[in-house]
Amino acid sequence: SNSAQIGILASILFLLICWLIRDSLIVKDLNGKHVFITGCDSGFGNLLAKQLDRRGFHVIAACLTEKGSQELLACTSLSLKTVILNLTDSSSIDNAVEFVRQETDGESLFGLVNNAGTATPMAPTDWLQIDDFHAILDVNLVGLIEITLKLLPLLKRANGRVVNVASVMGRLAFLGGGYCLSKWGVEAFSDILRRDMQHFGVKVSIIEPGCFQTGITSSEAIERDLLRLWNQLTPEVRESYGDQYFVEYVKAQRLSMKRLCDSDISKVTNCMEHALIAKYPRTRYGPGWDAKFFWLPLSYAPTLLSDTMLSMLLPTPAASRKSVSRVPLV
Ligand SMILES: NC(=O)c1ccc[n+]([C@@H]2O[C@H](COP(=O)([O-])OP(=O)(O)OC[C@H]3O[C@@H](n4cnc5c(N)ncnc54)[C@H](OP(=O)(O)O)[C@@H]3O)[C@@H](O)[C@H]2O)c1
């Protein structure tokens, strides 16, 4: 049985080596190919734009603000172009698509990186209004779908690549609000798009980052928004949570951002780059140790286990359980 064990180990090693070699193969003639990236004002998109610009791609970087666009232009090569894009506005999307068409001479677009996103408001469900869901879903999901649909003809002509940024939090549906819904939706849209587009040589990859220090995970922005929501609550809802809950919720957010968030965001942009340049891009990338060793395994765990673990990360409302025992039995 010893030789059987050695045989199995050798086969696993052989398969691993084959996979590593396959994974390291790169597409030829990448120089000068066009890549369109959304959300380049800051964070992952900003770093990726600079990274791909240095690599010789023709980067078309979409920024939400003029300030973001000017700052990016000031530190990149002349071949990088910027365009203003607000994903909640169809005419802004049409304008950006027209810009891409002109830049590529109506020919082909090699890469689309759907990176832009927003995460606030993120709070317990009964603190939110329907507009709070729209504020996120309109950017992260509906906007992403609209720009993708409009760029698909150019991508199909190039046998191009689509790289969609989801989140490992989306797989777990951890935090309340539109964020996890939107990222869950991005996963589903990407899986469907990958199967539909495989016939045309368009490859679709999903990036599922763990927690990284960027604008989206800034504690101040999240806390400011939580306070706004807390102040808007009806006395009834506020009482059911209690003031202590709010204090502890804010503290839990701050601590988890501080403890979990990685400052090396190149781990994410390197995955995005791999999805664009590898001959065989992976379907899913999970950059970040927290994603690989905590959030992803937890997302595959039985619900009982993941619910218990996740509820340990958040405080308990004042009226929890008590309200159950108060329910009259007759
Ligand atoms: N950081 C993390 O831990 C993490 C984890 C998982 C997934 N992600 C995802 O990674 C992506 C990039 O986020 P990031 O972490 O790099 O945060 P970020 O620095 O806030 O970047 C998000 C970008 O999207 C832009 N944006 C916001 N609303 C927009 C709109 N309506 N239309 C067009 N662009 C808009 C932002 O512009 P402004 O800067 O001008 O607001 C910014 O450039 C997002 O999809 C996010 O959900 C992040």
Image (tube, grey):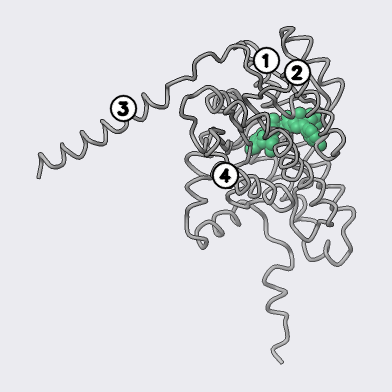
**Image quadrant in which the N terminus is located:** top left
Q: Earlier in the sequence, mark 3 or mark 1?
A: 3
Q: Choose mark 2 or mark 3, whichever is in front.
A: 2
In percent of the image, x 16 and y 41: which residue is there? 5
Which amino acid, mark 3? Ile
- Disc 1: residue Cβ within 8 A of ligand 1's nearest atom: no
- Taking the image as shown, residue 10 lies to the left or right of residue 257, namely left
Spatial CA span between label 3 and label 1:
33 Å
Q: Which mark is residue 103?
A: 2
In percent of the image, x 72 and y 80: which residue is there? 326
Spatial CA span between label 2 and label 3:
41 Å
Ligand 1 is found in the corner quadrant, namely top right
Q: Which residue is the site of mark 1? A: 58
Above or below: residue 159 compared with residue 7: above
* Number of other residues with Cα within 10 Å of mark 2, as a class: few under 14, some 14 to 19, many 20 or more: some
Q: Nearer the viewer, residue 241 or 221?
A: 221
Which amino acid, mark 4? Asp
* Residue 312 can be seen in this image: yes
Tell me, yes or no, whether the two marked residues, 1 and 2, touch with CB atoms within 8 Å. yes
* Number of other residues with Cα within 10 Å of mark 4, as a class: few under 14, some 14 to 19, many 20 or more: few
Label 3: which secondary element: helix
Q: Earlier in the sequence, mark 4 or mark 2?
A: 2
| Residue 44 in picture, x, y percent from top left | 67, 27
Tell me, yes or no, whether the two marked residues, 4 and 1, touch with CB atoms within 8 Å. no
* Residue 215 can be seen in this image: no
Which amino acid, mark 2? Glu
Q: Earlier in the sequence, mark 2 or mark 3?
A: 3
Q: Which mark is residue 196?
A: 4
Q: Choose mark 4 or mark 1, whichever is in front.
A: 4
- Taking the image as shown, residue 81 lies to the left or right of residue 7, namely right
